[in-house]
């Protein structure tokens, strides 16, 4: 009985840890197709702190690639096959992706995540006490 309880507790902790990882970095899935004209889409927008999962394929016979050098992403793009890669973009900015063999290029814009500042109503002032008016 103790073993079953211990196993159940361990399994629930592992499941909780896996869910916590998912919440830590939300995942955005992006599909990119290499065509004769270049990448489709040619530009992407994501938010900082997101994990981006790339799915890359090609419509042309010649082998191509997709490289995001700043984040060490190197992917093959072959006709009829889908290649996958994941990367987290921690800083806002513009990053280029390209393929040196086909001269294709594109742009990935990482937008700064807006976090509203929460202010406390009594911050910076003396706390006031409500007093009834005298009539």
Image: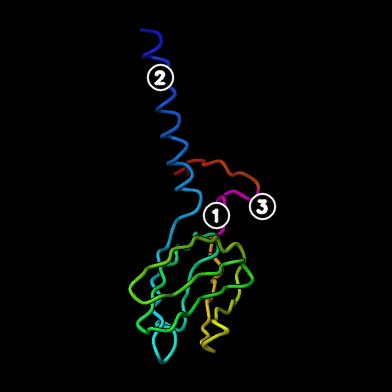
Is there CB contact under 8 Å for labels 2 and 1? no
Q: Which of marks 2 and 1 is nearer the N terminus?
A: 2
Residue at figure coordinates x 36%, y 77% from the top left: 79
Q: Which of marks 1 and 3 is nearer the N terminus?
A: 1
Which type of secondary structure does the marked residue at label 2 adopt?
helix
Assign the magenta stretch its main secondary structure: loop
- Pick the front one: 110 or 29: 29
Q: Does the magenta stretch include residue 55?
A: no
Render colour scheme: rainbow
Q: Label 2 belongs to which residue? A: 7
Circle 3 SS class? loop
Query: Is 123 in front, or is 83?
Result: 83
Alpha carbon of mark 1 to alpha carbon of mark 3: how far?
Answer: 14 Å
In this picture, residue 13 sits left or right of residue 48: left
Residue that numbered label 3 is attached to: 124
Mark 2 residue crowding within 10 angstroms, few (<14) / some (14–19) / many (20+)? few
Coordinates of residue 55 in the picture (x, y in percent): 40, 68
Q: Do the residues labelled 1 and 3 touch (CB within 8 Å)?
A: no
In this rendering, is residue 73 above or below 43? Answer: above
Looking at the picture, tell me which residue is in the foreground, 97 or 12. 97
Tell me where the magenta segment starts and ends, as one range. 116-125
Q: In which quarter of the image is residue 60?
A: bottom left
Q: How far apart are marks 2 and 1 (CA)?
A: 42 Å
Residue in view at x 55 percent, y 85 percent: 101
* Picture residue at 42% right of the left edge, 21% below the top: 9
Quarter of the image containing the C terminus?
top left
Specify whether residue 117 is painted magenta: yes
């Amino acid at each position: 009985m103790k073993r079953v309880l211990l196993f159940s507790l361990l399994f629930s902790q592992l499941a909780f840890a896996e869910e916590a990882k998912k919440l830590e970095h939300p995942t955005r899935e992006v599909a990119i197709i290499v065509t004769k004209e270049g990448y489709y889409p040619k530009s992407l927008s994501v938010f900082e702190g997101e994990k981006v999962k790339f799915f890359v394929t090609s419509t042309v016979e010649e082998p191509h690639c997709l490289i995001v050098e700043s984040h060490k992403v190197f992917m093959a793009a072959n006709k009829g096959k889908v290649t996958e890669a994941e990367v987290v973009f921690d800083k806002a900015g513009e990053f280029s992706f390209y393929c040196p063999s086909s001269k294709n290029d594109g742009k990935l814009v990482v937008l700064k995540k807006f976090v509203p500042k929460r202010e406390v109503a009594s911050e910076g002032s003396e706390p006031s006490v409500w007093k009834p008016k005298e009539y």
